Image (cartoon, rainbow, N blue to C red):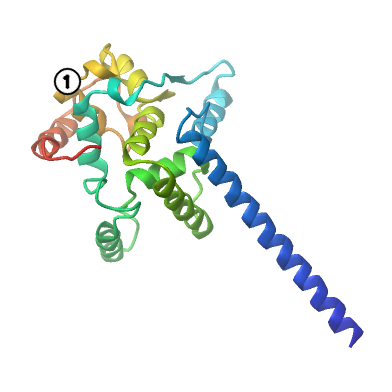
Amino acid sequence: MGFLVTAWKAFCFALGAIVLALALTQLWFFAHIVYWSQFEPSTTAFMGSRLETLRARNPKAKLYRQSVPYAQISVHLKRAVIAAEDAKFLDHEGFDWEAIQKAMEKNERSGRIVAGASTITQQLAKNLFLSGSRSWLRKAQEAVITWMLERVMSKRRILELYLNYVEWGEGIFGAEAAARYHFGVSAAALTFEQAAWLAVILPAPRRYEAGRMTPYIAGRIANLSSHMDKAQIP
């Protein structure tokens, strides 16, 4: 009997420790989100991971990023990114359930993962806090962080952070660095076509040379262009 009591106490203690650790972890995430709703992150988890990878090949490697206020980012780029990545950005609360259902059906038909349905908020959650690993635990944490971001930040702030911290080339992060690297202009001066080009390469930004137009990209831009003007931005 004494052994069972001791074992039960040990179990309760271990369970309590796990719950406390989880609660403290979520509080840490929440505190950062509250702070970043007003101030700029100095770096992100994804940027740290990319820098580590680059420095494994070149110890002197560095990232190129420059934050600019929301108003100094081309409206064309805002519309292009929303049209390409998350057409219902202003309407959902972090998750596009219809897109998730369609992606699941498409993946089931293919027998492998060929489609995703991450919203801009979900992508921001991953970029700010999480590793590139794939697991159900990481997806659950991503969902919690996404929920926090939508509750604490405005859509405008979420999009502003996304545009300033997303990767747009090898070591190139944010709209300002991307605009200057690929086209030699500021983020505010991006044209309709340049903005569409940047939006189109987002799924695999390290695959393309600076500003280079290919038949594939041209086709994607032509398709995206028909939706850009309809994209609603905060």
Q: Nearer the viewer, residue 110 or 220?
A: 220
Q: Is residue 17 visible?
A: yes
Query: With 6 as the anchor, is 188 left or right in this view?
Result: left
Picture coordinates of residue 174, whole percent (x, y): 37, 25
**Which residue occupies 78% across, 67% down?**
13
Q: Is residue 200 visible?
A: no
Element under disc 1: loop
Query: With 222 as the anchor, is 186 left or right in this view?
Result: right
Q: How many marks?
A: 1
Residue 209: image quadrant is top left
Residue 232: image quadrant is top left
Residue 175: image quadrant is top left
Crowding near pointer 1: few (<14 within 10 Å), some, many (20+)? Answer: some
Query: With 63 as the anchor, is 210 left or right in this view?
Result: left
| Kind of residue at badge 1 | Thr
Picture coordinates of residue 229, whole percent (x, y): 11, 35
Residue labelled with disc 1: 191
Up/down of 186 relative to 144, above or below: above
Which quarter of the image is occupied by the N terminus? bottom right
Picture coordinates of residue 90, whole percent (x, y): 25, 46
Which quarter of the image is occupied by the C terminus? top left
Q: Residue furthest right?
A: 2
Picture coordinates of residue 106, whole percent (x, y): 25, 61
**Which residue occupies 44% across, 44% down?**
125
**Which residue occupies 71% across, 67% down?**
15
Q: Residue furthest top?
A: 184
